[in-house]
Amino acid sequence: MPAKTFSAALHGIDAKIIEVEADISHGLHSFSIVGLPDKSVDESKDRVNSAIKNSGFTPPKKTNQKITINLAPANIKKEGSSYDLPIALSYLLASKQIFFDAKEKVFVGELALDGKVRPVNGVLSIVSAAKENGFKKMIVPKENFKEANLIKNIDIIPIGTLYECIDYLKGTFFPKMEEIKEAPAEESVADDFDFCYVKGQEQAKRALEVAASGGHNILMSGPPGSGKTMLAKAFLTILPELTEKERIETTKIYSIAGKLKDREYLVTKRPFRSPHHSSSLIALTGGGQHAKPGEVSLAHNGVLFLDEFPEFQKNAIEALRQPLEDKEITVSRAYGSFSYPANIILIATQNPCPCGYFNTGQKECICSMQNILRYQKKISGPILDRIDIQVEVPMVEHEKLTEKKLSEKSADIKSRIEMARKIQNERLRAENISKNSEMNHPQIKKYCELEKDSEMFLKQIAENNSISARSYYKIIKLARTIADLEEEKKIKMRHLAEAVQYRIK
């Protein structure tokens, strides 16, 4: 009779429970793994064989038997080395070398040739799936223990070797649970990027404050050296801290992508991803052979900074349409579709032309009009329509550069933003969203009350400028955020007027 253990397969940001069945029958020796495994899973036969042998048991290759391992359901692609441990245990059960009750237990871990259990990616998602499916215990490599222990109300058992795991299942070994301390303290951002060191650019600073308050995307345009990159890096210092829910979400993505740093088990800082403009479509949006999350998803709950925006590949820029609108991105491959969260704040920068000095009054532009138009057309209308705030960042006057007086500190701006976010959280809690930028049309009508003169003003703006429906509603959402910064319940004319200047040039 086949023996069975349980493991899990990553599917996007989530995981699905996998049954690992082992059957042994008489015949010429063979060891096969079925159930849509990839090359790394198929190679586990050799790792499992050596690990079992070096743990003191009879390995599959020492027997004259036909061994079949089935990973069910068979229509889900199985990738990675995390199935090594459950495959080894299933074989040992089927060959009657060990006996234990596999119910309510999920196993993951890569096996070294000497039987050591190595850490794997995506443990946080796997533990979440195990808990949701009613499993009581999760056996993980000891290096993954801290990460797995973030999920409560399920027993996490850390093991270091295959032999230790077998002894635990026999009841003769009890793993030592490492004491989990609180998540590491938030590292302060370098003082060099504090807003107080940014000279001038008051309009850009205000625009970034509005963007941080409501989670709005922003495009900054200006010549080289005007401070666009410094403003973008300073932006991280005014964002509110990650909530507990956001930390878990972000950690899941980094765990799946294998981006957790050594000894780091929880992401505590908002991500700031700054891919180079030569990045490919797959690097930006995700995909590849194993459909891993891309930069858009790695920036979830944080900032995606695209410097020199028009220099990115055209197809990569256009692929941002879905995540900017839906706050998630879907990667489709022949063997399935995977959805990754992408609730980001996009900060993009661009120059007015390829040389950077068109209409700046600083230097003479050396670009032909044809090159200027071609450069500016790289950012299509639909993409611009999805960017809430568009602001000019001119060169700073020399008098301001020599001023000794510092500007407003990031901490002071951050306190206003936190207050505005708190107002939004309380207002939108029933809608299961937290920021104004996430509101849909019915929610805008429900929560963005306009005064009569404000309605007339916005109607006139819309008629005179032939703005799209998307722009119309984005102006209202921006005005709602500006009102929240002033702790106003109703959207007033001055709030709309400021929002309009960020959308219509």
Image: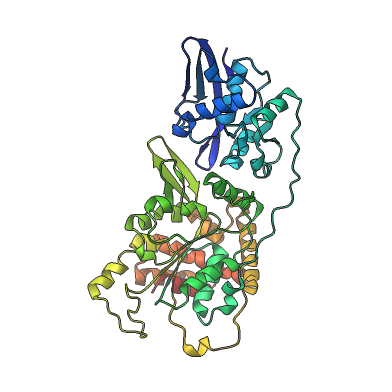
Q: In the image, 18: left or right of 42?
A: right
Instruction: Between residue 359 and residue 435, name the one nearer to us.
Output: 359
Residue 250 in view in this figure: yes
Q: Position of residue 337 (x, y in %)?
A: 43, 39
Q: Nearer the viewer, residue 30 or 258?
A: 30
Instruction: Name the spot of residue 460 as percent of width and height, x first.
Output: 40, 72
Residue in view at x 50 percent, y 66 percent:
478
Q: Tell me if residue 6 can be seen.
A: no
Residue located farthest toward the top when viewing the structure as drawn? 26
Q: Nearer the viewer, residue 322 or 144?
A: 144
Q: Residue at x 50, y 63 (%)?
A: 216
Which residue appears farthest toward the bottom when viewing the image? 399
Quarter of the figure with residue 409: bottom right
Residue positioned 69% across, 56% down in the render: 184
Indicate the quadrant containing the C terminus: top left, top right, bottom left or bottom right: bottom left
Can you give x and y, in whole percent of width and height, for residue 118 in the image? 60, 38
Q: Which residue shows up at 45% across the image and 62% down it?
A: 473
Above-or-below relation of 384 to 29: below
Determine whether, in the image, residue 402 is placed left or right of residue 418. left
Image quadrant containing the N terminus: top right
461 over 286 or under it: above or below? below
Question: Considering only vertical position in the picture, is 198 above or below 2?
Answer: below
Q: Position of residue 109 (x, y in %)?
A: 59, 34
